[in-house]
Image (cartoon, rainbow, N blue to C red):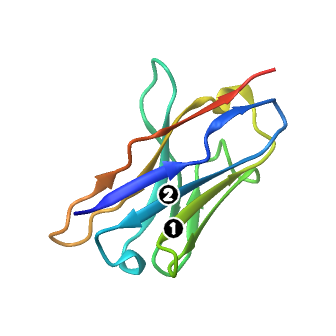
Amino acid sequence: QVQLVESGGGLVQPGGSLRLSCAASGYIFSRYAMGWYRQALGKQRELVATVRSDSSTNYADSVKGRFAISRDNGKATVYLQMNNLKPEDTAVYYCYRYASGLYPAYWGQGTQVTVSS
């Protein structure tokens, strides 16, 4: 079955960096677009970044120039490098596999990122 397992979250000071990882299994990773979403307390879940199967990317305006999404098809892993973190980046970050044709989307379990001094 499809599994998405995030890691790399934690507590970081403003201006710091973190790298999130999402290890995928149970499907042919290279064929699917992948994304990172986040949900802050009391707010709706929002799309942070997407990387397609051709490695093209898109970002939310709020993270452009600070975050970078990438994928390693050999390791079936998608990454989110987060630099110059701000308190407003505090949220649970979720890995997301986009749906494709008849195959549904999947979510990871989430990893907490807290930006605070």
The residue positioned farthest toward the right in the image shown? 15
- Picture coordinates of residue 62 (x, y %)? 66, 41
Question: Dot 2 lies on which element?
Answer: strand
Say whether residue 34 is left or right of residue 85: left
Residue 49 lies in quadrant = bottom right
| Residue at image location 33% in from the left, 78% down from the top | 28
Q: Which mark is residue 77?
A: 1
Say whether residue 59 is left or right of residue 18: left
Q: Which residue is the site of mark 2?
A: 22
Q: Nearer the viewer, residue 72 or 39?
A: 72
Q: Nearer the viewer, residue 47 or 92?
A: 92
Q: Is residue 29 above or below residue 58?
A: below
Mark 2 and mark 1 in contact? Answer it, CB < 8 Å: yes
Disc on the earlier residue, 2 or 1: 2
Residue 29 lies in quadrant = bottom left
| Residue at image location 27% in from the left, 63% down from the top | 99
- Picture coordinates of residue 76 (x, y %)? 47, 73
- Picture coordinates of residue 78 (x, y %)? 53, 64
- Picture coordinates of residue 87 (x, y %)? 72, 26
Q: Is residue 62 above or below residue 2?
A: above
Residue 12 lies in quadrant = top right
